[in-house]
Image: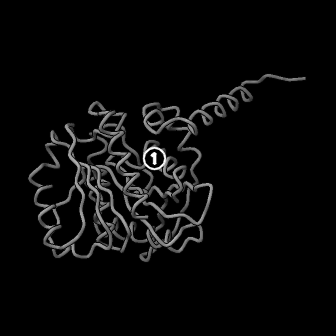
Amino acid sequence: MNIDTPGRRAVGRRAVVCGIASAAPLATILADARLARAEAAALKSVSITTRSRRAITAALALPVRTPAPGVLLIHEWWGLNDQIKAVAGELAREGYVALAVDLYGGRVATTPDAAKPLMQAIDPLQATETLVAWADWLRDNPKTSAKIATIGWCLGGGWSLNASLATPVDATVIYYGQVDQPAERLARLNGPVLGHFATRDTWITKTMVDTFEAEMRQADRPLTVYWYEADHAFANPSGARYDQKDAQLAWERTQHFFRTNL
């Protein structure tokens, strides 16, 4: 006899949503809170201790086949939310060991007023230690091959670059992140950099990016920059400035960059 109960129906609904999430394009998942939540729930929480004895956590998504290249994902000023975890899940489907790190100690904001103090409270030394610790963890993980990359958006875009300056990685992707670094620091980069920037961005301006390009040339480090007729955070489907066409193009370019360098 088949007994239908609220619990059974809830499990069934979760299974359906998870099935849809696993088959849907990334843009569809990110634009639907239920699908992003289901994708995020499939990730495994992992924790380690840094050299300064701080406990840190991250969300891990594994590909079907390992060992595979590793990708370190760094969240926006909102924190490690379902959206970033969903991108990690997509990268795992693409064949990468995807690790979404948490710079906020588990805190997640949903409004700018809540996000701003979290971003301002970041200790640069601790954040760097966190990212280096997770990069080391990826390198030492038997499921990860020899190559790793970083990718980040907004706040995480700047920290994607910072992480690559602090520890050798094979590729760096920056989505509209802060890039005002001098050539002497940029010379530490071990691999190429890909940057996605928006023409209407009033925070990460063309002047900043132009200077970044000049400093990268002086440092003799490979850099590819793409400009989009869009605004800051154009790749975030949950925001008002989302630009679906440009977000898709940027993601395709990111995938190609990873395939080429990892």
Which sits in the foreground, 69 or 59? 69
Q: At x 28% / y 52%, what residue is drawn?
A: 155
On the image, numbered disc 1 is attached to which residue?
Answer: 87
Q: At x 51% / y 58%, what residue is drawn?
A: 96
Question: Residue farthest to the right?
Answer: 1
Which sits in the foreground, 120 or 39? 39
Say few, some or many: other residues with alpha carbon within 10 Å of mark 1 (under 14 / 14 to 19 / 20 or more): many
Q: How is the image coloured?
A: one colour
- Kind of residue sitting beneath label 1: Val
Q: Quadrant of the C terminus?
A: bottom left
Left or right: 69, with 191 as reference point: right
Question: Residue farthest to the left?
Answer: 207
Residue 211 location (% of width, % of height): 10, 60
Q: At x 13% / y 43%, what residue is drawn?
A: 202
15 versus 162 height, above or below: above
Q: At x 45% / y 67%, what residue is drawn?
A: 134
SS at mark 1 in the image? helix
Left or right: 209, with 234 as reference point: left
Residue 198: which quarter of the image? top left
31 versus 94 height, above or below: above
101 versus 53 height, above or below: above
6 versus 102 height, above or below: above
Q: Quadrant of the N terminus?
A: top right
Residue 193 location (% of width, % of height): 28, 62
Left or right: 219, with 248 as reference point: left
Residue 98 location (% of width, % of height): 49, 57
Left or right: 50, with 185 as reference point: right
Residue 148 location (% of width, % of height): 44, 67
